[in-house]
Image (cartoon, rainbow, N blue to C red):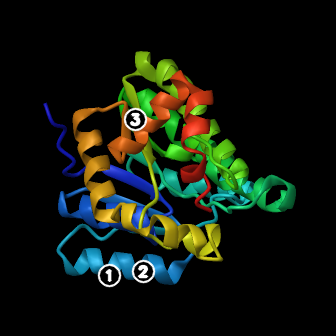
Amino acid sequence: MKKSLKNKVVLITGASSGIGRQLAIDLAKQGAKLILVARSEVKLMEVKKQIELSGGYPPAVWTMDVGDGERVDDLLPKLLGEMPAVDILINNAGFGKFDSFVDADMKEIEAMFDVNVIGLMRFTSHVLPSMIEAGKGHIVNIASQAGKLATPKSSGYSASKHAVLGFSNSLRLEMKEHGIFVTTVNPGPIKTNFFDIADSSGTYTKNVEKMMLSPEKVSDEIISAIEKGKREVNLPGWMNAGAKLYHTAPGLVEKAAGKFFNQK
């Protein structure tokens, strides 16, 4: 049975662009009441205006850097205290930087973990108490196929997304008795501004452009997973099949797909 999203309070991090922006627009059409979080107030206000023009509930807009732990811990409890309890948390904020590890900047890797992992966990920790009290809720963590199948020049990013998967799988088991469901989303490359930072040279984007997913497709799949209570969303299917094969026969896959792995 599909879950209705009408009047559900949904908090989305990284909501000013890419998947987060598309999810905000699509969820608003279903009657959800949104709380949108991102660093750029200008971009958030653009999303808010588009939602209002389309007849959706005016969303709450919170300007915040998910990776700034002190600010999040100081500000988030106050903001949450002024709002109805969150029914669905979508931890979407994240970024990547593609470099060989020997050339990587450790400060950039730390920043990736601050946003992709610690920030995600921090938001979850602030939202969970009210969900546990209500005996219901849904956490959606945006991970990546890179967390399942690492490739060259993505060591830091893949490690951060692998951590998201580990955290999510453990949290799912812990929260089952409280009526709280956890979904992980593992997309391959998507046509968003993610690659403006991740792939500044444009090499990877050019090599995989034809296989990139659209934000609209990913948003549709995520919303369907929320409605149906799916454990995981894996896109595209062929890439997930490759990840499964890798875990069965890693040496064989590395030997056979070496050229494909080196797209960055």
Residue occupying image coordinates x 56% and y 46%: 146
Let me know if residue 164 appears in the view.
no
Figure quadrant of residue 69: bottom right
Residue occupying image coordinates x 25% and y 67%: 57
Residue occupying image coordinates x 50% and y 84%: 42
Q: Are marks 1 and 2 in contact (CB under 8 Å)?
A: yes
The residue that label 3 is drawn on is 241
Q: Is residue 249 above or below residue 72?
A: above
Looking at the rendered structure, the kind of residue marked 2 is Met
Q: Nearer the viewer, mark 3 or mark 1?
A: 3
Figure quadrant of residue 199: bottom right
Residue 122 location (% of width, % of height): 63, 44
Q: Which class describes the residues within 10 Å of circle 1: few (<14), some (14-19), or many (20+)? A: some
Which label number is shown at residue 230? none
Residue 125 location (% of width, % of height): 59, 38
Q: Residue furthest front?
A: 256
